[in-house]
Image: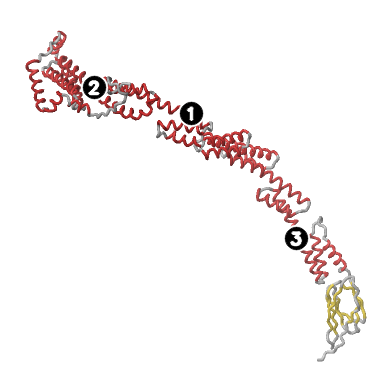
Amino acid sequence: MADLQDPSQQTPKKHKVIHWNPEEDDLGANSKPAVKAYLGGAIVALLVVGIGVISYFLFFYTPPTATPEQIAAAGASETDPRRAFESVSRAQGVKDSVDRKLEAARQMPITGNEVLRQKLINIEKEKIEADDLMSKNRFARAIAQYNSVDSLIEDFTSEVENKQRARGLYDDFLVRSGELEIVKHLDEESFESAFGLASEGKKFLDSGSFTLALQRMEEASSSLDAVTKAKQNFISSNAAEGNRFIAQGKSEEAVEAFTKVLELDPTNDEALKQLERSRVADKVFAALQSAKTNEDEGQLESALGFYQQAASIDSGSAKAQSGVSRVRRKISERDFTAAYSAAQTAIGESRFQDAIVNYQTALEIFPERTDIEAAIERAVAEKRQNDIVTRITQAYEFERVFDWRSARDLYQELVQMEPDLKEAKDGLLRTGRMIRSILRYETLLEVATTEAQRTEFQLAIRTFDEAMKSKPEYLPLTEEGDRLRKFLQLQSQPVSVTLVSDGSTWVSVQGPSMRKPEKFDTTTVDLLPGRYFIIGRKKGYQDVRFGIQIRGGMSQDPITVSANVKNDY
Protein backbone atom coordinates (compact mmCIF):
# COMPACT_ATOMS: atom_id res chain seq x y z
CA MET A 1 0.00 0.00 0.00
CA ALA A 2 1.22 3.52 -0.69
CA ASP A 3 2.05 4.92 2.71
CA LEU A 4 1.86 8.53 3.70
CA GLN A 5 5.01 8.13 5.89
CA ASP A 6 8.68 7.93 4.83
CA PRO A 7 9.02 4.79 2.64
CA SER A 8 12.50 4.14 4.14
CA GLN A 9 11.04 3.34 7.54
CA GLN A 10 10.83 -0.38 8.30
CA THR A 11 8.16 -0.27 11.03
CA PRO A 12 4.84 -2.13 10.43
CA LYS A 13 2.59 -0.36 7.95
CA LYS A 14 0.12 2.02 9.50
CA HIS A 15 -2.18 4.47 7.78
CA LYS A 16 -1.41 8.03 8.63
CA VAL A 17 -4.65 9.90 9.19
CA ILE A 18 -4.53 12.91 6.91
CA HIS A 19 -6.13 15.96 8.49
CA TRP A 20 -6.53 18.75 6.01
CA ASN A 21 -8.24 22.08 6.18
CA PRO A 22 -9.42 23.63 2.90
CA GLU A 23 -7.31 26.70 3.84
CA GLU A 24 -4.24 24.55 4.60
CA ASP A 25 -2.69 25.38 1.23
CA ASP A 26 -3.04 29.05 1.95
CA LEU A 27 -1.53 28.70 5.43
CA GLY A 28 1.21 26.37 4.11
CA ALA A 29 2.05 28.78 1.39
CA ASN A 30 2.61 31.46 3.98
CA SER A 31 5.36 29.30 5.50
CA LYS A 32 7.50 29.67 2.34
CA PRO A 33 10.09 32.44 2.52
CA ALA A 34 8.82 34.28 -0.54
CA VAL A 35 5.22 34.22 0.69
CA LYS A 36 6.19 35.22 4.22
CA ALA A 37 8.04 38.16 2.77
CA TYR A 38 4.97 38.96 0.74
CA LEU A 39 2.66 38.82 3.74
CA GLY A 40 5.16 40.65 5.97
CA GLY A 41 5.40 43.65 3.70
CA ALA A 42 2.25 43.62 1.64
CA ILE A 43 2.11 47.33 1.07
CA VAL A 44 5.79 47.60 0.12
CA ALA A 45 5.49 44.63 -2.21
CA LEU A 46 2.51 46.13 -3.96
CA LEU A 47 4.37 49.38 -4.47
CA VAL A 48 7.43 47.52 -5.73
CA VAL A 49 5.36 45.46 -8.12
CA GLY A 50 3.63 48.56 -9.40
CA ILE A 51 6.87 50.46 -9.91
CA GLY A 52 8.45 47.36 -11.46
CA VAL A 53 5.67 46.96 -13.98
CA ILE A 54 5.84 50.64 -14.92
CA SER A 55 9.65 50.52 -15.18
CA TYR A 56 9.41 47.40 -17.29
CA PHE A 57 7.15 49.06 -19.79
CA LEU A 58 9.15 52.27 -19.78
CA PHE A 59 12.67 50.88 -20.09
CA PHE A 60 12.62 47.21 -21.12
CA TYR A 61 9.42 46.49 -23.01
CA THR A 62 9.71 46.34 -26.76
CA PRO A 63 6.48 45.88 -28.65
CA PRO A 64 6.40 42.75 -30.76
CA THR A 65 7.33 43.29 -34.36
CA ALA A 66 4.33 43.06 -36.63
CA THR A 67 4.30 40.53 -39.43
CA PRO A 68 4.03 41.65 -43.05
CA GLU A 69 0.45 40.45 -43.15
CA GLN A 70 -0.47 42.48 -40.04
CA ILE A 71 1.25 45.58 -41.49
CA ALA A 72 -0.65 45.12 -44.75
CA ALA A 73 -3.89 44.68 -42.84
CA ALA A 74 -3.17 47.78 -40.78
CA GLY A 75 -2.39 49.78 -43.88
CA ALA A 76 -5.54 48.56 -45.57
CA SER A 77 -7.60 49.52 -42.54
CA GLU A 78 -6.12 52.99 -42.54
CA THR A 79 -7.03 53.49 -46.21
CA ASP A 80 -10.43 51.69 -46.00
CA PRO A 81 -12.76 53.37 -43.42
CA ARG A 82 -15.19 50.45 -43.47
CA ARG A 83 -12.47 47.93 -42.62
CA ALA A 84 -11.09 50.27 -40.00
CA PHE A 85 -14.52 50.40 -38.33
CA GLU A 86 -14.78 46.61 -38.45
CA SER A 87 -11.34 46.25 -36.77
CA VAL A 88 -12.28 48.66 -33.98
CA SER A 89 -15.61 46.95 -33.37
CA ARG A 90 -14.05 43.52 -33.33
CA ALA A 91 -11.20 44.55 -31.05
CA GLN A 92 -13.64 46.27 -28.66
CA GLY A 93 -15.82 43.16 -28.55
CA VAL A 94 -12.86 40.92 -27.73
CA LYS A 95 -11.68 43.43 -25.12
CA ASP A 96 -15.09 43.57 -23.42
CA SER A 97 -15.24 39.77 -23.27
CA VAL A 98 -11.75 39.57 -21.74
CA ASP A 99 -12.63 42.33 -19.21
CA ARG A 100 -15.63 40.36 -18.00
CA LYS A 101 -13.67 37.10 -17.70
CA LEU A 102 -10.78 38.78 -15.93
CA GLU A 103 -13.11 40.42 -13.43
CA ALA A 104 -14.61 37.02 -12.69
CA ALA A 105 -11.12 35.51 -12.31
CA ARG A 106 -10.19 38.23 -9.81
CA GLN A 107 -13.11 37.13 -7.61
CA MET A 108 -11.89 33.53 -7.38
CA PRO A 109 -10.55 32.28 -4.01
CA ILE A 110 -6.76 32.25 -4.47
CA THR A 111 -5.66 34.17 -1.37
CA GLY A 112 -2.37 32.75 -0.01
CA ASN A 113 -1.67 30.50 -3.02
CA GLU A 114 1.54 31.75 -4.66
CA VAL A 115 1.21 29.69 -7.85
CA LEU A 116 -2.25 31.01 -8.66
CA ARG A 117 -1.28 34.53 -7.57
CA GLN A 118 1.66 34.55 -10.01
CA LYS A 119 -0.60 33.33 -12.80
CA LEU A 120 -3.08 36.10 -12.10
CA ILE A 121 -0.25 38.70 -12.06
CA ASN A 122 0.93 37.38 -15.42
CA ILE A 123 -2.58 37.66 -16.80
CA GLU A 124 -2.78 41.26 -15.57
CA LYS A 125 0.52 42.06 -17.32
CA GLU A 126 -0.61 40.51 -20.58
CA LYS A 127 -3.90 42.40 -20.29
CA ILE A 128 -2.04 45.71 -19.85
CA GLU A 129 -0.09 44.99 -23.04
CA ALA A 130 -3.32 44.32 -24.91
CA ASP A 131 -4.88 47.53 -23.60
CA ASP A 132 -1.76 49.49 -24.68
CA LEU A 133 -2.06 48.12 -28.19
CA MET A 134 -5.75 48.97 -28.19
CA SER A 135 -5.04 52.55 -27.12
CA LYS A 136 -2.54 52.90 -29.98
CA ASN A 137 -5.15 51.68 -32.47
CA ARG A 138 -3.07 48.63 -33.29
CA PHE A 139 -6.24 46.56 -33.41
CA ALA A 140 -5.00 43.41 -35.14
CA ARG A 141 -2.18 42.98 -32.61
CA ALA A 142 -4.55 43.96 -29.77
CA ILE A 143 -7.01 41.25 -30.81
CA ALA A 144 -4.21 38.66 -30.91
CA GLN A 145 -3.03 39.78 -27.47
CA TYR A 146 -6.55 39.71 -26.02
CA ASN A 147 -7.02 36.17 -27.36
CA SER A 148 -3.80 35.18 -25.61
CA VAL A 149 -5.09 36.74 -22.37
CA ASP A 150 -8.38 34.91 -22.81
CA SER A 151 -6.49 31.62 -23.11
CA LEU A 152 -4.52 32.42 -19.94
CA ILE A 153 -7.73 33.22 -18.08
CA GLU A 154 -9.30 29.94 -19.19
CA ASP A 155 -6.23 28.08 -17.95
CA PHE A 156 -6.28 30.04 -14.67
CA THR A 157 -9.99 29.36 -14.13
CA SER A 158 -9.48 25.68 -14.85
CA GLU A 159 -6.64 25.51 -12.32
CA VAL A 160 -8.73 27.19 -9.61
CA GLU A 161 -11.60 24.81 -10.29
CA ASN A 162 -9.25 21.83 -10.27
CA LYS A 163 -7.86 22.97 -6.92
CA GLN A 164 -11.32 23.24 -5.42
CA ARG A 165 -12.38 19.88 -6.82
CA ALA A 166 -9.18 18.23 -5.63
CA ARG A 167 -9.69 19.68 -2.17
CA GLY A 168 -13.26 18.44 -2.11
CA LEU A 169 -12.22 14.95 -3.19
CA TYR A 170 -9.49 14.92 -0.54
CA ASP A 171 -11.99 15.86 2.18
CA ASP A 172 -14.34 13.19 0.92
CA PHE A 173 -11.48 10.67 0.87
CA LEU A 174 -10.71 11.27 4.53
CA VAL A 175 -14.34 10.63 5.49
CA ARG A 176 -14.82 7.64 3.22
CA SER A 177 -11.54 5.96 4.09
CA GLY A 178 -12.46 6.15 7.78
CA GLU A 179 -15.87 4.63 7.10
CA LEU A 180 -14.40 1.86 4.92
CA GLU A 181 -11.61 0.92 7.34
CA ILE A 182 -13.86 -1.82 8.77
CA VAL A 183 -14.29 -3.47 5.35
CA LYS A 184 -10.80 -3.02 3.92
CA HIS A 185 -10.19 -6.79 4.16
CA LEU A 186 -12.79 -7.28 1.41
CA ASP A 187 -10.51 -5.52 -1.13
CA GLU A 188 -7.25 -4.66 0.65
CA GLU A 189 -5.38 -3.97 -2.57
CA SER A 190 -7.78 -1.23 -3.65
CA PHE A 191 -7.86 0.18 -0.12
CA GLU A 192 -4.05 0.46 0.04
CA SER A 193 -3.91 1.87 -3.49
CA ALA A 194 -6.38 4.58 -2.53
CA PHE A 195 -4.12 5.79 0.29
CA GLY A 196 -1.09 5.91 -2.02
CA LEU A 197 -2.95 7.91 -4.64
CA ALA A 198 -4.38 10.26 -2.02
CA SER A 199 -0.85 10.89 -0.67
CA GLU A 200 0.38 11.82 -4.14
CA GLY A 201 -2.63 14.04 -4.67
CA LYS A 202 -1.96 15.86 -1.40
CA LYS A 203 1.63 16.52 -2.46
CA PHE A 204 0.51 17.92 -5.80
CA LEU A 205 -1.97 20.14 -3.99
CA ASP A 206 0.76 21.47 -1.75
CA SER A 207 3.05 22.12 -4.71
CA GLY A 208 0.35 23.86 -6.76
CA SER A 209 -0.03 21.13 -9.42
CA PHE A 210 -3.75 21.16 -9.19
CA THR A 211 -4.56 19.27 -12.38
CA LEU A 212 -2.31 16.39 -11.31
CA ALA A 213 -3.74 16.64 -7.78
CA LEU A 214 -7.26 16.32 -9.16
CA GLN A 215 -6.23 13.34 -11.31
CA ARG A 216 -4.72 11.49 -8.33
CA MET A 217 -7.67 12.25 -6.06
CA GLU A 218 -10.08 10.98 -8.71
CA GLU A 219 -8.03 7.79 -8.97
CA ALA A 220 -8.04 7.47 -5.16
CA SER A 221 -11.82 7.95 -5.15
CA SER A 222 -12.18 5.24 -7.81
CA SER A 223 -10.11 2.88 -5.64
CA LEU A 224 -12.41 3.58 -2.70
CA ASP A 225 -15.34 2.97 -5.03
CA ALA A 226 -13.94 -0.52 -5.60
CA VAL A 227 -13.84 -1.09 -1.83
CA THR A 228 -17.38 0.25 -1.52
CA LYS A 229 -18.49 -2.07 -4.30
CA ALA A 230 -16.83 -5.00 -2.49
CA LYS A 231 -18.75 -4.01 0.63
CA GLN A 232 -22.01 -3.78 -1.31
CA ASN A 233 -21.37 -7.15 -2.95
CA PHE A 234 -20.67 -8.70 0.45
CA ILE A 235 -23.86 -7.22 1.88
CA SER A 236 -25.93 -8.21 -1.15
CA SER A 237 -24.54 -11.75 -1.15
CA ASN A 238 -25.22 -12.33 2.53
CA ALA A 239 -28.61 -10.66 2.33
CA ALA A 240 -29.59 -12.87 -0.60
CA GLU A 241 -28.34 -15.93 1.25
CA GLY A 242 -30.25 -14.85 4.36
CA ASN A 243 -33.43 -14.43 2.34
CA ARG A 244 -32.99 -17.93 0.91
CA PHE A 245 -32.59 -19.33 4.41
CA ILE A 246 -35.77 -17.51 5.51
CA ALA A 247 -37.65 -19.05 2.59
CA GLN A 248 -36.30 -22.48 3.58
CA GLY A 249 -37.24 -22.02 7.23
CA LYS A 250 -33.61 -22.14 8.41
CA SER A 251 -33.69 -19.63 11.24
CA GLU A 252 -30.14 -20.10 12.57
CA GLU A 253 -28.51 -19.81 9.17
CA ALA A 254 -30.60 -16.76 8.26
CA VAL A 255 -29.74 -15.03 11.55
CA GLU A 256 -26.05 -15.67 10.91
CA ALA A 257 -26.21 -14.24 7.39
CA PHE A 258 -27.94 -11.00 8.39
CA THR A 259 -25.69 -10.64 11.44
CA LYS A 260 -22.72 -10.53 9.03
CA VAL A 261 -24.45 -7.78 7.09
CA LEU A 262 -25.08 -5.73 10.22
CA GLU A 263 -21.49 -6.13 11.37
CA LEU A 264 -20.43 -4.12 8.31
CA ASP A 265 -23.53 -1.93 8.07
CA PRO A 266 -25.11 -1.55 11.54
CA THR A 267 -27.72 0.95 10.33
CA ASN A 268 -29.00 -1.21 7.46
CA ASP A 269 -32.75 -1.01 8.05
CA GLU A 270 -33.54 -3.85 5.65
CA ALA A 271 -31.06 -6.17 7.36
CA LEU A 272 -32.49 -5.27 10.78
CA LYS A 273 -35.96 -6.09 9.56
CA GLN A 274 -34.88 -9.35 7.95
CA LEU A 275 -32.99 -10.32 11.10
CA GLU A 276 -36.25 -10.16 13.05
CA ARG A 277 -37.94 -12.28 10.37
CA SER A 278 -35.07 -14.77 10.53
CA ARG A 279 -35.79 -15.56 14.18
CA VAL A 280 -39.28 -16.88 13.34
CA ALA A 281 -38.49 -18.30 9.90
CA ASP A 282 -38.84 -21.92 11.06
CA LYS A 283 -42.34 -21.33 12.47
CA VAL A 284 -43.45 -19.45 9.39
CA PHE A 285 -42.07 -22.16 7.12
CA ALA A 286 -43.98 -24.87 9.02
CA ALA A 287 -47.24 -22.92 8.77
CA LEU A 288 -46.68 -22.30 5.06
CA GLN A 289 -46.02 -25.99 4.43
CA SER A 290 -49.27 -26.97 6.18
CA ALA A 291 -51.11 -24.28 4.25
CA LYS A 292 -49.74 -25.53 0.91
CA THR A 293 -50.68 -29.13 1.70
CA ASN A 294 -54.24 -28.18 2.60
CA GLU A 295 -54.53 -25.95 -0.44
CA ASP A 296 -53.40 -28.76 -2.75
CA GLU A 297 -55.98 -31.07 -1.17
CA GLY A 298 -58.76 -28.55 -1.64
CA GLN A 299 -59.15 -27.84 2.08
CA LEU A 300 -59.29 -24.15 1.43
CA GLU A 301 -60.60 -22.97 4.81
CA SER A 302 -57.86 -24.88 6.62
CA ALA A 303 -55.25 -23.57 4.17
CA LEU A 304 -56.46 -20.02 4.74
CA GLY A 305 -56.10 -20.49 8.49
CA PHE A 306 -52.48 -21.62 8.15
CA TYR A 307 -51.63 -18.77 5.75
CA GLN A 308 -53.15 -16.29 8.18
CA GLN A 309 -51.17 -17.87 11.01
CA ALA A 310 -47.94 -17.46 9.02
CA ALA A 311 -48.83 -13.85 8.21
CA SER A 312 -49.50 -13.09 11.88
CA ILE A 313 -46.09 -14.50 12.86
CA ASP A 314 -44.26 -12.67 10.07
CA SER A 315 -46.14 -9.75 8.56
CA GLY A 316 -43.34 -9.33 6.02
CA SER A 317 -43.80 -12.81 4.52
CA ALA A 318 -44.81 -12.30 0.90
CA LYS A 319 -45.71 -16.00 0.60
CA ALA A 320 -48.07 -15.76 3.53
CA GLN A 321 -49.71 -12.58 2.24
CA SER A 322 -50.06 -13.87 -1.31
CA GLY A 323 -51.32 -17.20 0.05
CA VAL A 324 -54.04 -15.46 2.03
CA SER A 325 -55.10 -13.47 -1.04
CA ARG A 326 -54.94 -16.48 -3.35
CA VAL A 327 -56.92 -18.84 -1.10
CA ARG A 328 -59.53 -16.22 -0.35
CA ARG A 329 -59.92 -15.80 -4.08
CA LYS A 330 -60.26 -19.55 -4.54
CA ILE A 331 -62.88 -19.72 -1.79
CA SER A 332 -64.78 -16.88 -3.40
CA GLU A 333 -64.60 -18.52 -6.83
CA ARG A 334 -65.70 -21.86 -5.37
CA ASP A 335 -68.64 -20.34 -3.53
CA PHE A 336 -69.54 -18.23 -6.54
CA THR A 337 -69.54 -21.25 -8.83
CA ALA A 338 -71.68 -23.24 -6.38
CA ALA A 339 -74.21 -20.42 -5.99
CA TYR A 340 -74.33 -19.69 -9.72
CA SER A 341 -74.77 -23.37 -10.63
CA ALA A 342 -77.53 -23.75 -8.03
CA ALA A 343 -79.27 -20.68 -9.46
CA GLN A 344 -79.07 -22.07 -13.00
CA THR A 345 -80.47 -25.41 -11.86
CA ALA A 346 -83.31 -23.68 -10.00
CA ILE A 347 -84.16 -21.65 -13.11
CA GLY A 348 -84.39 -24.84 -15.12
CA GLU A 349 -86.77 -26.32 -12.51
CA SER A 350 -88.84 -23.12 -12.30
CA ARG A 351 -87.79 -22.59 -8.67
CA PHE A 352 -87.36 -18.91 -9.24
CA GLN A 353 -87.14 -17.83 -5.61
CA ASP A 354 -84.28 -20.28 -5.02
CA ALA A 355 -82.65 -18.99 -8.19
CA ILE A 356 -82.91 -15.38 -7.00
CA VAL A 357 -81.44 -16.23 -3.59
CA ASN A 358 -78.48 -18.04 -5.16
CA TYR A 359 -77.90 -15.30 -7.73
CA GLN A 360 -77.84 -12.74 -4.92
CA THR A 361 -75.31 -14.86 -3.04
CA ALA A 362 -73.13 -15.00 -6.14
CA LEU A 363 -73.44 -11.23 -6.62
CA GLU A 364 -72.37 -10.57 -3.02
CA ILE A 365 -69.15 -12.50 -3.74
CA PHE A 366 -68.38 -10.64 -6.98
CA PRO A 367 -70.36 -7.36 -6.93
CA GLU A 368 -68.76 -6.24 -10.18
CA ARG A 369 -70.54 -9.00 -12.16
CA THR A 370 -73.20 -7.01 -14.01
CA ASP A 371 -74.34 -10.18 -15.79
CA ILE A 372 -75.53 -11.54 -12.44
CA GLU A 373 -77.57 -8.39 -11.86
CA ALA A 374 -79.22 -8.94 -15.23
CA ALA A 375 -79.85 -12.61 -14.37
CA ILE A 376 -81.54 -11.57 -11.11
CA GLU A 377 -83.78 -9.14 -12.99
CA ARG A 378 -84.80 -11.89 -15.42
CA ALA A 379 -85.41 -14.33 -12.58
CA VAL A 380 -87.58 -11.80 -10.75
CA ALA A 381 -89.64 -11.19 -13.90
CA GLU A 382 -90.02 -14.92 -14.55
CA LYS A 383 -90.90 -15.54 -10.90
CA ARG A 384 -93.59 -12.89 -11.05
CA GLN A 385 -95.11 -14.37 -14.17
CA ASN A 386 -94.84 -17.85 -12.72
CA ASP A 387 -96.41 -16.70 -9.45
CA ILE A 388 -99.36 -15.23 -11.36
CA VAL A 389 -99.93 -18.43 -13.30
CA THR A 390 -99.46 -20.58 -10.20
CA ARG A 391 -101.88 -18.52 -8.11
CA ILE A 392 -104.51 -18.52 -10.83
CA THR A 393 -104.19 -22.29 -11.12
CA GLN A 394 -104.38 -22.75 -7.36
CA ALA A 395 -107.35 -20.39 -7.09
CA TYR A 396 -109.22 -22.37 -9.74
CA GLU A 397 -108.43 -25.54 -7.88
CA PHE A 398 -109.75 -24.08 -4.63
CA GLU A 399 -112.93 -23.07 -6.44
CA ARG A 400 -113.27 -26.56 -7.83
CA VAL A 401 -113.31 -27.99 -4.32
CA PHE A 402 -115.49 -25.09 -3.07
CA ASP A 403 -112.73 -23.59 -0.90
CA TRP A 404 -113.91 -20.09 -1.63
CA ARG A 405 -111.95 -18.31 1.07
CA SER A 406 -108.60 -19.73 -0.04
CA ALA A 407 -109.47 -18.93 -3.65
CA ARG A 408 -110.47 -15.37 -2.67
CA ASP A 409 -107.20 -14.84 -0.82
CA LEU A 410 -105.24 -15.87 -3.91
CA TYR A 411 -107.31 -13.61 -6.14
CA GLN A 412 -106.63 -10.72 -3.77
CA GLU A 413 -102.89 -11.39 -4.01
CA LEU A 414 -103.17 -11.46 -7.78
CA VAL A 415 -105.00 -8.13 -7.87
CA GLN A 416 -102.23 -6.61 -5.77
CA MET A 417 -99.61 -8.06 -8.10
CA GLU A 418 -101.43 -7.22 -11.33
CA PRO A 419 -104.34 -4.79 -10.79
CA ASP A 420 -105.55 -5.09 -14.40
CA LEU A 421 -105.56 -8.91 -14.48
CA LYS A 422 -109.11 -9.82 -15.60
CA GLU A 423 -108.98 -13.38 -14.23
CA ALA A 424 -108.10 -12.05 -10.80
CA LYS A 425 -110.83 -9.41 -10.76
CA ASP A 426 -113.50 -11.85 -12.01
CA GLY A 427 -112.39 -14.51 -9.57
CA LEU A 428 -112.47 -12.03 -6.68
CA LEU A 429 -116.07 -11.07 -7.53
CA ARG A 430 -117.12 -14.69 -7.97
CA THR A 431 -115.60 -15.99 -4.75
CA GLY A 432 -116.85 -12.94 -2.85
CA ARG A 433 -120.40 -13.64 -4.00
CA MET A 434 -120.16 -17.29 -2.99
CA ILE A 435 -118.68 -16.45 0.40
CA ARG A 436 -121.44 -13.94 1.06
CA SER A 437 -124.08 -16.55 0.11
CA ILE A 438 -122.55 -19.11 2.44
CA LEU A 439 -122.25 -16.53 5.19
CA ARG A 440 -125.96 -15.61 4.76
CA TYR A 441 -126.94 -19.24 4.79
CA GLU A 442 -125.02 -19.96 7.93
CA THR A 443 -126.39 -16.83 9.60
CA LEU A 444 -130.01 -17.64 8.70
CA LEU A 445 -129.51 -21.19 9.90
CA GLU A 446 -128.33 -19.91 13.25
CA VAL A 447 -131.30 -17.51 13.46
CA ALA A 448 -133.75 -20.32 12.61
CA THR A 449 -132.24 -22.47 15.35
CA THR A 450 -132.61 -19.63 17.83
CA GLU A 451 -136.23 -19.04 16.78
CA ALA A 452 -137.05 -22.72 17.12
CA GLN A 453 -135.52 -22.72 20.59
CA ARG A 454 -137.85 -19.83 21.44
CA THR A 455 -140.79 -21.99 20.13
CA GLU A 456 -141.34 -19.50 17.32
CA PHE A 457 -141.71 -22.47 15.04
CA GLN A 458 -143.42 -20.81 12.13
CA LEU A 459 -140.95 -17.93 12.09
CA ALA A 460 -138.13 -20.47 12.34
CA ILE A 461 -139.60 -22.39 9.40
CA ARG A 462 -139.65 -19.25 7.25
CA THR A 463 -136.10 -18.36 8.27
CA PHE A 464 -134.95 -21.92 7.56
CA ASP A 465 -136.53 -21.73 4.11
CA GLU A 466 -134.63 -18.49 3.41
CA ALA A 467 -131.41 -20.20 4.52
CA MET A 468 -132.03 -23.07 2.14
CA LYS A 469 -132.44 -20.58 -0.70
CA SER A 470 -129.03 -19.05 0.09
CA LYS A 471 -127.24 -22.39 0.52
CA PRO A 472 -125.12 -23.39 -2.50
CA GLU A 473 -126.34 -26.58 -4.07
CA TYR A 474 -123.03 -28.36 -3.54
CA LEU A 475 -123.01 -27.58 0.16
CA PRO A 476 -124.45 -30.48 2.20
CA LEU A 477 -126.69 -29.80 5.15
CA THR A 478 -124.90 -30.36 8.39
CA GLU A 479 -126.12 -32.90 10.91
CA GLU A 480 -127.32 -30.11 13.13
CA GLY A 481 -129.04 -28.43 10.21
CA ASP A 482 -130.67 -31.68 9.23
CA ARG A 483 -132.03 -32.16 12.77
CA LEU A 484 -133.40 -28.63 12.62
CA ARG A 485 -134.98 -29.33 9.23
CA LYS A 486 -136.71 -32.48 10.52
CA PHE A 487 -137.83 -30.73 13.68
CA LEU A 488 -139.26 -27.83 11.74
CA GLN A 489 -140.99 -30.22 9.32
CA LEU A 490 -142.75 -31.77 12.32
CA GLN A 491 -143.66 -28.32 13.59
CA SER A 492 -145.16 -27.46 10.24
CA GLN A 493 -147.98 -30.03 10.64
CA PRO A 494 -151.26 -28.80 12.34
CA VAL A 495 -152.18 -30.32 15.68
CA SER A 496 -155.84 -31.07 16.53
CA VAL A 497 -156.93 -29.36 19.68
CA THR A 498 -160.35 -29.84 21.41
CA LEU A 499 -161.91 -26.74 22.87
CA VAL A 500 -164.74 -27.02 25.42
CA SER A 501 -167.04 -24.06 26.32
CA ASP A 502 -170.53 -23.33 27.76
CA GLY A 503 -172.19 -22.34 24.48
CA SER A 504 -172.54 -18.72 25.56
CA THR A 505 -168.87 -17.64 25.79
CA TRP A 506 -167.26 -16.15 22.80
CA VAL A 507 -163.97 -18.05 22.27
CA SER A 508 -161.15 -16.75 20.07
CA VAL A 509 -157.60 -18.06 19.40
CA GLN A 510 -154.56 -15.78 18.83
CA GLY A 511 -151.32 -17.22 17.51
CA PRO A 512 -149.86 -18.72 14.38
CA SER A 513 -153.33 -20.07 13.44
CA MET A 514 -155.87 -17.35 14.18
CA ARG A 515 -159.54 -18.23 15.03
CA LYS A 516 -162.35 -15.67 15.09
CA PRO A 517 -164.57 -15.54 18.20
CA GLU A 518 -167.36 -18.10 18.19
CA LYS A 519 -169.72 -19.86 20.63
CA PHE A 520 -169.76 -23.56 21.04
CA ASP A 521 -170.03 -26.23 23.56
CA THR A 522 -167.27 -28.38 22.08
CA THR A 523 -165.19 -27.94 18.92
CA THR A 524 -161.96 -29.28 17.42
CA VAL A 525 -159.48 -26.94 15.74
CA ASP A 526 -156.23 -27.63 13.83
CA LEU A 527 -153.47 -25.36 15.10
CA LEU A 528 -149.97 -25.09 13.75
CA PRO A 529 -147.37 -25.65 16.46
CA GLY A 530 -146.49 -22.49 18.33
CA ARG A 531 -147.46 -20.21 21.19
CA TYR A 532 -151.17 -19.27 21.44
CA PHE A 533 -153.50 -17.23 23.57
CA ILE A 534 -157.05 -18.52 24.20
CA ILE A 535 -159.50 -15.75 25.02
CA GLY A 536 -163.15 -16.20 26.33
CA ARG A 537 -165.56 -13.27 26.56
CA LYS A 538 -169.17 -13.10 27.84
CA LYS A 539 -171.19 -10.04 28.58
CA GLY A 540 -171.31 -9.29 32.28
CA TYR A 541 -168.50 -11.67 33.00
CA GLN A 542 -164.77 -11.27 33.32
CA ASP A 543 -162.67 -12.23 30.26
CA VAL A 544 -160.80 -15.49 30.34
CA ARG A 545 -157.24 -15.37 28.88
CA PHE A 546 -154.44 -17.96 29.03
CA GLY A 547 -151.64 -19.14 26.89
CA ILE A 548 -150.84 -22.57 25.55
CA GLN A 549 -147.87 -24.09 23.72
CA ILE A 550 -148.68 -26.36 20.81
CA ARG A 551 -145.89 -28.75 19.74
CA GLY A 552 -145.97 -31.02 16.80
CA GLY A 553 -145.87 -34.71 17.50
CA MET A 554 -147.40 -34.25 20.96
CA SER A 555 -151.09 -34.88 21.89
CA GLN A 556 -152.98 -31.98 23.42
CA ASP A 557 -155.51 -32.38 26.21
CA PRO A 558 -158.93 -30.70 25.75
CA ILE A 559 -158.99 -27.07 26.73
CA THR A 560 -162.00 -25.59 28.57
CA VAL A 561 -162.78 -21.98 27.93
CA SER A 562 -165.77 -20.52 29.86
CA ALA A 563 -166.33 -16.99 31.22
CA ASN A 564 -168.32 -17.70 34.44
CA VAL A 565 -167.05 -15.05 36.80
CA LYS A 566 -169.34 -12.07 36.88
CA ASN A 567 -168.12 -8.55 36.88
CA ASP A 568 -168.61 -6.68 40.16
CA TYR A 569 -169.64 -3.44 38.50
Point 45% across, 32% down: residue? 258
Q: What is the number of the mark on residue 344?
A: none
**Tag 2–tag 3 contact (CB < 8 Å):** no
Whole-number angstrom distance, CA of label 2 to CA of label 1: 49 Å
Given the image, on which type of amino acid does mark 2 rest?
Glu
- Amino acid, disc 3: Leu
Residue at the image position 76 percent from the left and 49 percent from the top: 397
Which is more toward the observer, 495 or 455? Answer: 455
- Residue farthest to the right, as pictured: 522
Q: Residue 259's x, y, as percent?
A: 44, 33
Residue closest to the eye, 148 or 279: 279
**How far apart are the two marked residues, 3 and 1, measured between alpha carbons?**
94 Å
Q: Which residue is mark 1?
A: 241
- Say which label, 2 or 1, has the lower sequence index: 2
100 lies left or right of 539: left
Residue 53, horizontal then vertical, whole percent: 10, 20
Residue at the far bottom: name it.
569
Task: Give the amino acid at mark 1.
Answer: Glu
Q: Name the secondary structure under disc 1.
A: helix
**Res. 122 image quadrant:** top left
Residue 352 vs residue 20, the one in the foreground? 20
Q: Which residue is mark 3?
A: 439
- Which-is-in-front pick, marks 2 and 1? 1
| Label pair 2/1, CB-CB below 8 angstroms | no
The residue that label 2 is drawn on is 159
Residue 451, x across and y down, in percent: 80, 69
Q: Secondary structure at mark 3?
A: helix
- Which callout, 2 or 3, points to the residue nearer the camera? 2
Give the side of residue 11 with respect to residue 524, left or right. left
The alpha-carbon separation of the residues under discs 2 and 3 comes to: 124 Å
